[in-house]
Image (cartoon, grey):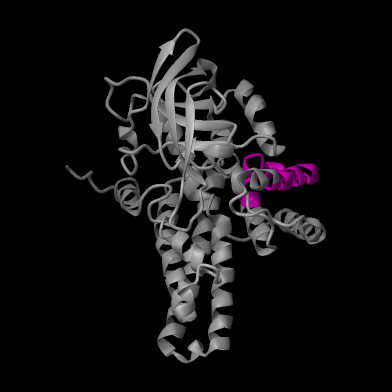
């Protein structure tokens, strides 16, 4: 498989790199991590700049390779992360592009691209995390609406979101994977209560969401009724296949910074640490090649990443945790200072073997869908 770039793709890279070099020095300071309205405004302002420069459609209007180059170059340049736009740009938007009607694409995609609307993800529930298909939030049809009752947890950016990609159970009698529907729920609808959650790192980008007889227009259903699990697999393929690309580049940068810090503070003299950093360098180089392979596969399959994303997500989650464990070794006692470099990132890394599907779920997917092994029996 050819993992090289075409002249047109390299031309795109050069133009993007030049543009980033001009605009990044002009950006205002980032708001405080606790100022979510300010962070929303900052993140959407950056998205608007991308839109005006012609780079906003890379997440679903361009080829997977162009998307890869965009994520690589923006991370290397230190450009703002998608932040509050994460779900809309990397999950909901690509799903609507792949599965939505022409009317749905026209309604929801342009505001995401222009930096006008934020989405959150309403998938997990208190009793339906790893076993997502066991979700209990119900939606009954009432005329032109679905009436939704239930609760969601770990809902990303719910406190500043305009829309929620919401999974509901529309047929409680069907087998659990077959009675699910994917809805776009307006977050200003009556009956919605949002309660922010504090993470181990002290941030509150997640929330509990309680739904009490919330009316969602049936026109907001993406895909057919009770076909939401298949649509969800499309969403998760984007989440696992391409959403973490920029983070691989960031980890490779952090690895270089760790080496420099180890040389500065004398820990580089430890041969075991040098071997550890060398092995991590090989890990992330391999992950980058796997990313390129997954992108090539997506190119061949119409733009939707395949199950190879689970292989990537599984290994990347553990490699990221190992990277920040190595950071703690480099820092020594400084690893206990929350104000120090890489410390909060280390706390955040603990969630990666849970977020976007636990490592146990990814192993099941690899075993059953790639290796063809029989399903386990409970």
| Rendered image quadrant of residue 359 | bottom left
- The foreground one among 224 and 302 is 224
In the picture shown, does residue 226 fall above or below 356? above
The residue under the point 38% across, 56% down is 353
In the picture, residue 79 is in which quadrant?
A: bottom right
Residue at 68 percent across and 62 percent down: it is 78
Can residue 367 be seen here? The reply is: yes
Depicted 250 relative to depicted 162: above or below: below
For the point 48% across and 22% down, the residue is 191
Residue 151 lies in quadrant:
top left
**In the image, which residues are magenta?**
42-67
Question: In the image, what residue occupies the spot 69% across and 32% down?
Answer: 110
**Residue 211 appears at what percent x and percent y?**
43, 26
Decide which of 200, 171 is in the foreground and name it. 200
Q: Main secondary structure of the magenta part?
A: helix
6 left or right, relative to 140: right
Horizontal and vertical percent for residue 342?
53, 69
């Amino acid at each position: 498989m050819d993992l090289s770039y075409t002249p047109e793709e390299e031309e795109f890279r050069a133009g993007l790199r030049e543009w980033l070099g001009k605009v990044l020095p002009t950006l205002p300071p980032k708001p405080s991590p606790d100022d979510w309205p300010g962070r929303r405004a900052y993140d959407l302002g950056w998205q608007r700049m991308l839109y005006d420069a012609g780079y906003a459609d890379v997440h679903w209007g361009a080829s997977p390779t162009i998307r890869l180059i965009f994520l690589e170059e923006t991370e290397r340049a230190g450009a703002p992360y998608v932040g509050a736009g994460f779900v809309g740009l990397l999950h909901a938007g690509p799903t609507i592009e792949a599965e939505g009607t022409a009317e749905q694409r026209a309604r929801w995609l342009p505001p995401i691209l222009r930096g006008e609307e934020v989405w959150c993800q309403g998938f997990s529930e208190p009793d339906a995390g790893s076993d997502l298909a066991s979700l209990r939030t119900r939606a009954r049809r009432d005329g032109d609406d679905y009436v939704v009752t239930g609760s969601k947890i770990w809902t990303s950016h719910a406190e500043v979101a305009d829309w929620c990609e919401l999974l509901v159970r529309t047929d409680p009698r069907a087998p659990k994977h077959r009675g699910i529907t994917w809805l776009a729920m307006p977050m200003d609808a009556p009956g919605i209560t949002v309660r922010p959650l504090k993470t181990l790192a002290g941030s509150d980008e997640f929330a509990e969401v309680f739904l009490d007889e919330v009316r969602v227009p049936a026109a907001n259903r993406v895909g057919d009724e009770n076909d939401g699990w298949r649509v969800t697999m499309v969403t998760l393929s984007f989440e696992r296949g391409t959403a973490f690309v920029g983070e691989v580049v960031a980890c490779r940068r952090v690895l270089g910074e760790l080496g420099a810090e180890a040389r500065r503070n004398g820990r580089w003299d430890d041969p075991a640490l040098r071997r550890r950093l060398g092995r991590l360098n090989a890990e992330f180089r391999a992950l980058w090649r796997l990313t390129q392979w997954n992108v090539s596969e997506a190119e061949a399959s119409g733009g939707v990443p395949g199950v190879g994303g689970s292989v990537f997500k599984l290994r990347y989650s553990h490699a990221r945790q190992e990277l920040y464990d190595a950071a703690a070794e480099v820092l020594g006692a400084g690893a206990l200072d929350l104000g120090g470099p890489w410390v909060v990132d280390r706390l955040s890394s603990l969630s990666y073997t849970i977020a976007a599907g636990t490592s146990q779920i990814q192993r099941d997917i690899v075993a059953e869908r790639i290796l063809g092994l029989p399903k386990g029996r409970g």
